[in-house]
Image: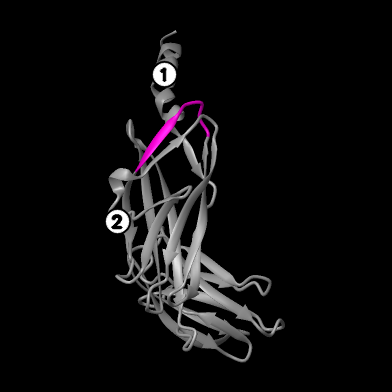
């Protein structure tokens, strides 16, 4: 009887944890902007309220490496806001079970060729532990000078980005010779092997989760048919 009482006590204590889990889900995971200098792109943010309650969220913060010439706007329907200045004005109301599809993130590429990432954190106005994060990354190209790319006979490979990386690191590539075997090897600063990734010729991007890596300097190497082609640096931060 005593064990049964302990079991139901723990079960009762865990109920709030279960009821708070996965309140709102971001369905448009990994928003990406890629374009030329001076261009602007808009992406849809799709949210799902998976509870039977009305949820009201406020934008708490915008974090990331956004350049001075780059512009970010968050649009709810036709109403757009500057998340750097209008934090107090940005409020999302989601009805029970609602699928929100009229929320947009607009990004102006700016005047410098670069790569980076940023995220927006939304919190429930009645419960600060109830939150969700919208993650985005961008790549700005100079149409006159394509930078940070290795263009070889068999493959074109971008530099890793963002660099430094916090959660993910990405390579864009195009394998021009389908018979070649291409891979990326990652080693620690002192040369210890960390990971090895084959580049799928049917894809054009390799995304690596570096959130479990220790902060520090790593090196990545491109191999073609097991031949060392080039080595460059990757920095991981927390």
The residue under the point 36% across, 48% down is 121
Q: Quadrant of residue 129?
A: top left
**Which dot marks residue 84?**
2
Q: Quadrant of residue 166?
A: bottom left
* Magenta stretch encompasses residue 225: no
Question: Is residue 168 at least partly visible in the picture?
Answer: no
Residue situated furthest right in the rendering: 179
* Quarter occupied by the C terminus: bottom left
Side (left or right) of 178 relative to 111: right
Residue situated furthest bottom in the rendering: 153
- Give the image location of residue 227, x and y in percent: 57, 88
Q: Which residues are magenta?
A: 50-58
Pointer 1 with pointer 2, Cβ within 8 A: no
* Magenta stretch encompasses residue 53: yes
- Give the image location of residue 117, x and y in percent: 40, 64
The correct choice, above or below, for 98 with respect to 59 in the image is: above
Q: Quadrant of residue 113?
A: bottom left
The correct choice, above or below, for 29 with respect to 192 in the image is: above
**Which dot marks residue 12?**
1
The residue under the point 47% across, 26% down is 53
């Amino acid at each position: 009887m005593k064990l049964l009482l302990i079991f139901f006590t723990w079960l009762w204590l865990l109920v709030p944890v279960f009821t708070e889990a996965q309140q709102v889900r971001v369905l448009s995971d990994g928003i990406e902007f890629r374009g030329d200098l001076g261009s602007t792109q808009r992406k849809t943010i799709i949210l799902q309220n998976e509870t039977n309650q009305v949820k009201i969220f406020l934008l708490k913060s915008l974090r990331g490496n956004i350049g001075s010439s780059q512009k970010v706007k968050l649009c709810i329907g036709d109403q757009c806001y500057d998340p750097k200045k209008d934090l107090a004005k940005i409020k999302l109301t989601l009805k029970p079970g609602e699928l929100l599809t009229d929320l947009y993130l607009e990004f102006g590429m700016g005047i410098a060729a670069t790569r980076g990432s940023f995220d927006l954190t939304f919190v429930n106005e009645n419960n600060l532990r109830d939150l969700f994060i919208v993650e985005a990354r961008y790549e700005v190209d100079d149409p006159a000078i394509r930078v940070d790319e290795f263009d070889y006979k068999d493959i074109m490979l971008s530099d890793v980005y963002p660099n430094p990386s916090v959660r993910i690191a990405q390579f864009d590539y195009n394998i021009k010779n389908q018979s070649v075997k291409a891979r990326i090897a990652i080693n620690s600063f002192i040369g210890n092997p960390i990971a090895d990734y084959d580049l799928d010729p049917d894809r054009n991007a390799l995304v690596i989760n570096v959130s479990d890596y220790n902060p520090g300097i790593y090196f990545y190497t491109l191999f073609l048919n097991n031949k060392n082609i080039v080595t460059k640096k990757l920095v991981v931060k927390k």
